[in-house]
Image: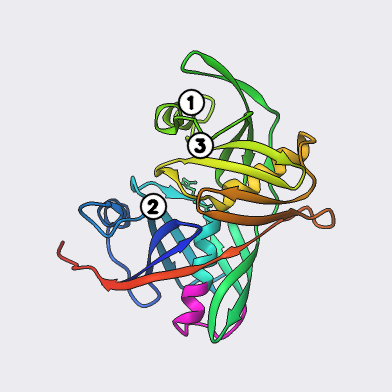
Amino acid sequence: MRFTKMQGLGNDYVYVDCTQRAPEDLPELARRISDRHFGVGSDGLICIFPSEKADFRMRMFNADGSEGEMCGNGIRCVGKFVYDHGLTDQTTVRVETLAGVKILRLQVERGQVVSATVDMGLPVPQEPRTLQIMGRPYQARPVSMGNPHAVVFLDQIDALDLPAIGPAFENHPSFPNRTNTEFVEVLDETHLKMRVWERGSGETLACGTGACATLVAAALAGKAGRKATIHLLGGDLSVAWSEEDGHVYMTGPAVTVFEGEWPEDR
Ligand SMILES: N[C@H](CCC[C@H](N)C(=O)O)C(=O)O
């Protein structure tokens, strides 16, 4: 099985072209291939299928084998994958996800995609709530970007012990489908610093849907405007929440790391 390892801001996935044929047990493949010691090493697995509703369909699996509805850094890399591999010659690409069809605009330089802007659709924010996490109260605002997020504003995030508190947010009874959690420090109205604990994958260097959820929560709380740069451990994303259509637009890089072959009988 051929695969391509790609990353967006260091949020890395193994990508497999499933337009002709697909491996059988995708959750099991995701667990094995994501392992950083016994596998290729990644935050998860993303498979690209044909679609009846759009140009392509993507399925994303976390490192624990669970399936996520959507992946912001991943969908930009899907755009790069299909363009660079010649599966499309279009720079506007529609991708079906479990969170609906998303539209990508690809930026091409010297024949290859370098970045993409994604129409992430309508966010679904809820009222903030107080969660008791390891004996301490935290204010968290749930925001769905098709997948679940909880955004927590803190004075400083560098010293947070995410492996200690992350799982308590992820598995809090308030989130029946578990949640991704963003820990956010507001630098100013247009600059937010964020770390993420991802459902099913743990701390990652970046999360595209999480950056979008963060901007929405910050705008609703009056902590930011409707457009900001989100600083993540792996780099910066530009996110805008349009006043016109209410959609969130995310722009960021997509990078191929290497291609390889995975033994099918492994
Ligand atoms: N890193 C991804 C999100 C993965 C979300 C996944 N962990 C879930 O279970 O929803 C992103 O760039 O949007």
Q: Amino acid at mark 1?
A: His
Q: In percent of the image, x 71 and y 43: which residue is there?
A: 216
* Mark 2 residue CB less than 8 A from any atom of ligand 1: yes
176 is within the stretch colored magenta = no
Instruction: Depth check: give the residue in front, 188 or 167.
Output: 188
Callout 3 touching callout 1 (CB < 8 Å): yes
Q: Which residue is labeled 1 in the image?
A: 172
Q: Is residue 146 visible?
A: no
Q: Which residue is labeled 3 in the image?
A: 179
Q: Residue 174 vs residue 61: left or right? A: right
Instruction: Depth check: give the residue in front, 149 or 135.
Output: 135
Q: Label 1: state its secondary structure.
A: loop
Q: In percent of the image, x 55 and y 77: which residue is there?
A: 113
Which percent across, then down, holds residue 240?
A: 73, 55
Instruction: Depth check: give the residue in front, 252 or 141.
Output: 252
Vertical comparison of 265 with 147: above or below? below
Q: Which mark is residue 66?
A: none
Q: In percent of the image, x 18 and y 68: which residue is there?
A: 263
The magenta region covers 80-92
Q: CA distance from mark 3 to mark 1?
A: 8 Å
The image quarter containing residue 220 is: top right
* Mark 3 residue CB less than 8 A from any atom of ligand 1: no
Does label 3 or label 2 sit earlier along the sequence? 2
Mark 2 crowd level (few <14, some 14–19, many ≥20, 10 Å Cα): many
Which percent across, then down, holds residue 262?
A: 23, 68
Q: Which residue is labeled 2 in the image?
A: 43
Mark 3 crowd level (few <14, some 14–19, many ≥20, 10 Å Cα): many
* Quadrant of image for the N terminus: bottom left
Q: Residue 108 vs residue 66: left or right? A: right
Q: Amino acid at mark 2?
A: Asp
Q: Is residue 151 visible?
A: yes
Q: Amino acid at mark 3?
A: Thr
